[in-house]
Amino acid sequence: QVQLVDSGGGLVQPGGSLRLSCAASRSIFSFNDMGWYRQAPGKERELVAVITSGGNTNYADSVKGRFTISRDNAKNTVYLQMNSLKPEDTAVYYCNARGPVGATMLTSYWGQGTQVIVSS
């Protein structure tokens, strides 16, 4: 069973930064892709950023230029560096992993979520 542990959320002022971490219980190379989603109160969960097993990245338009997804293969950890945070970034952020790599049907795994609040 795959476990993803999200951490790094908190309260930050507008314009501030946070770094989220997602630690996986097995090698991140076993996943087709890993990403971060977020869900604000009353809204649907939305994709924020994704990184594929080949290292390609993709971002939601709303976070391009402000957020960066990266990974540390040795630590089996994916990060989301969030800069220039805005109040509208307030949400619960969830790590997601899909695998196994190369499969025609991918299984999706989720972290428990970490709360990010951007407020003065």
Image (cartoon, rainbow, N blue to C red):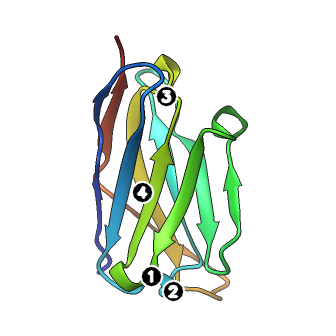
Q: CA distance from mark 1 to mark 2?
A: 8 Å
**Residue at the disc numbered 4:** 95
**Residue at (44% x, 66% y) in the render:** 78
Describe residue 24's horizontal placement relative to residue 80 as left or right. Answer: left
Front-lying residue, 31 or 79 = 79
Whether the residues at callouts 1 and 2 have beta carbons within 8 Å, the answer is yes
Q: Secondary structure at mark 3?
A: loop
Q: CA distance from mark 3 to mark 2?
A: 30 Å
Residue 20 picture location, percent across and down: 37, 51
Residue extending furthest toward the top: 120
Residue 85 picture location, percent across and down: 49, 28
Disc with the residue nearer the chain's start (4 vs 3): 3
Q: Amino acid at mark 1?
A: Asn
**Residue at (40% x, 86% y) in the render:** 27
Disc with the residue nearer the chain's start (3 vs 1): 1
Q: Secondary structure at mark 2?
A: helix
Figure disc tally:
4
**Residue at (60% x, 38% y) in the render:** 66
| Residue 85, numbered label | 3
Q: CA distance from mark 1 to mark 4?
A: 16 Å
Describe residue 97's horizontal placement relative to residue 13 as left or right. Answer: right
| Residue 29, numbered label | 2
Disc with the residue nearer the chain's start (3 vs 2): 2
**Residue at the disc numbered 1:** 73
